[in-house]
Amino acid sequence: MPDGTVRTYLAVSGKPAYLAEIDTFTGKVQRMIPLYVPDSLSTEQPPDTGAQGAWGVSVDSRGTVFVSSYGFGHGYRLPCRAQAIGDLGRPSPRTSCGSPDKYPRPPPSAGACRSNRRHAS
């Protein structure tokens, strides 16, 4: 990480799914962050009740962690040193991997998608 710490991040499926932050050297779980950010203004149908599972984690050069989920299909972002995870929402029908409307950088699922955009870190 940019601050010199070494962490391992795991996407863990379950109800709700969560992002686990682990100290790489000790193996101790530092945090377990549920993949759910309540949004009373959301108009999604069916309403989002949290990720049912997660399958992809990526960390960019700034230490921001991205995680993909299934069930409601949201992407999540945890900036370096942040205490709370952010919900990037569902990709829209016009979104491709790395589209700036939802994902300023490729989400963890980008390895399975094709994009013509180049992304600066």
Image: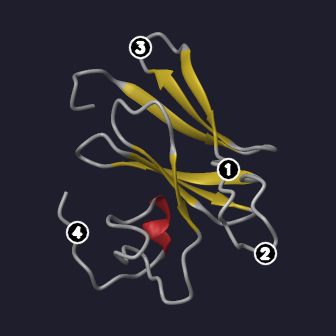
Relative horizontal placement of residue 106, taking residue 112 as reference (left or right): left
- Nearer the observer: mark 3 or 2; the answer is 2
Alpha carbon of mark 2 to alpha carbon of mark 4: how far?
A: 32 Å
Q: Which residue is pictured at 36% across the width and 73% down the height?
A: 98
The reply to whether discs 2 and 4 touch (Cβ–Cβ < 8 Å) is: no
Q: Which residue is pictured at 71% across the width and 44% down the height?
A: 17
Q: Quadrant of the N terminus?
A: top left
- Nearer the observer: mark 2 or 4; the answer is 2
Q: Position of residue 84 (x, y in %)?
A: 50, 36
Q: What residue did someone put label 1 on? A: 38
Q: Nearer the viewer, residue 112 or 32?
A: 32
Disc 3 marks a residue whose amino acid type is Phe
Alpha carbon of mark 3 to alpha carbon of mark 2: how far?
A: 43 Å
Disc 4 marks a residue whose amino acid type is His
- Nearer the observer: mark 1 or 4; the answer is 1
Alpha carbon of mark 3 to alpha carbon of mark 1: how far?
A: 33 Å
Disc 3: CA contacts within 10 A as few (<14), some (14-19) or many (>=20): few
Most extreme residue toward the front is 41
| Circle on res. 79 | none
> Which quadrant of the structure image shows residue 43?
bottom right
Most extreme residue toward the bottom is 94
Q: Position of residue 57 (x, y in %)?
A: 49, 49
Q: What residue did someone put label 3 on? A: 25
How many labels sit on residues?
A: 4
Disc 2 marks a residue whose amino acid type is Gln
Q: Quadrant of the C terminus?
A: bottom left
Q: What residue did someone put label 4 on? A: 119
Q: Is 115 situated above or below 6?
A: below
Disc 1 marks a residue whose amino acid type is Pro
Q: What residue did someone put label 2 on? A: 45
